[in-house]
Image (tube, rainbow, N blue to C red):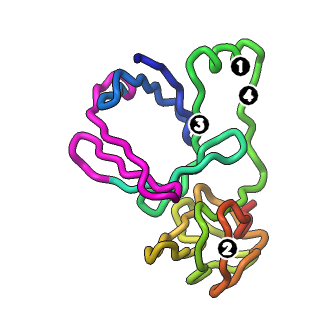
Amino acid sequence: MNVKYVATLDQTEYHVEIVDDKHVVLDGEVREVDFAAVGDQPIFSLLINGKSYEAFVYPHEEEWQVLLLGNLYSVRVEDEREKRLRAAAGGKVTERGEFHLKAPMPGLVVAVPVAEGQRVSKGDVLLILESMKMQNELKSPREGVVSRLRVNAGDSVEQSQTLLSVT
């Protein structure tokens, strides 16, 4: 199999090589993995070296949105050839002025512990979303100011719906 990818998360690149259906090489380190979809939702069970994780994973624009352990990550995944071609063409990842927190899954907004105009730090809880009887704390990926709230506690939301913005 041996397919190679570059995954970019927070401007850090990780080199991933899929060796076979049970092994990957992450930045030169071999890891035993088991990855399986759970039901009809974008929920995945992941075992890495015997440790279990559950993640919500779905595509969004040119990236993948991953909700893991209460943190929402945006990950750009490219095969190595695609990455080299983009670099040769002078493509750059630009800093965005505004971050839009989007619902990683349909659910019910349990709480919004922030207010418009409030300064937040990376890792601060922006919103608590209940889905499939689980409460998920959606955290800020960076420092900024909450510029717009689009939902309130008690609102039902759809997957990919914009919940709030941070500038």
Query: Which amino acid, by three-letter code, is at mark 3?
Result: Gln
Question: Residue at point 59% right, 36% down?
Answer: 11
| Picture coordinates of residue 66, whole percent (x, y) | 53, 51
| Highlighted magenta segment, given as a residue range | 26-52
Question: Residue at point 60% right, 44% down?
Answer: 64
3D distance between C-alphas at marks 2 and 4: 33 Å
Horizontal relation, residue 15 to residue 120: left or right: left
N-terminal-most mark, 1 or 4: 1
3D distance between C-alphas at marks 1 and 3: 15 Å
3D distance between C-alphas at marks 3 and 2: 30 Å
Dot label at residue 86? 1
* Location of mark 3 (residue): 11
| Picture coordinates of residue 59, whole percent (x, y) | 63, 46
Query: Which amino acid, by three-letter code, is at mark 4?
Result: Lys
Circle 4: is it few (<14), some (14-19), or many (20+) Cα within 10 Å?
few
N-terminal-most mark, 3 or 4: 3
Q: Secondary structure at mark 2?
A: strand
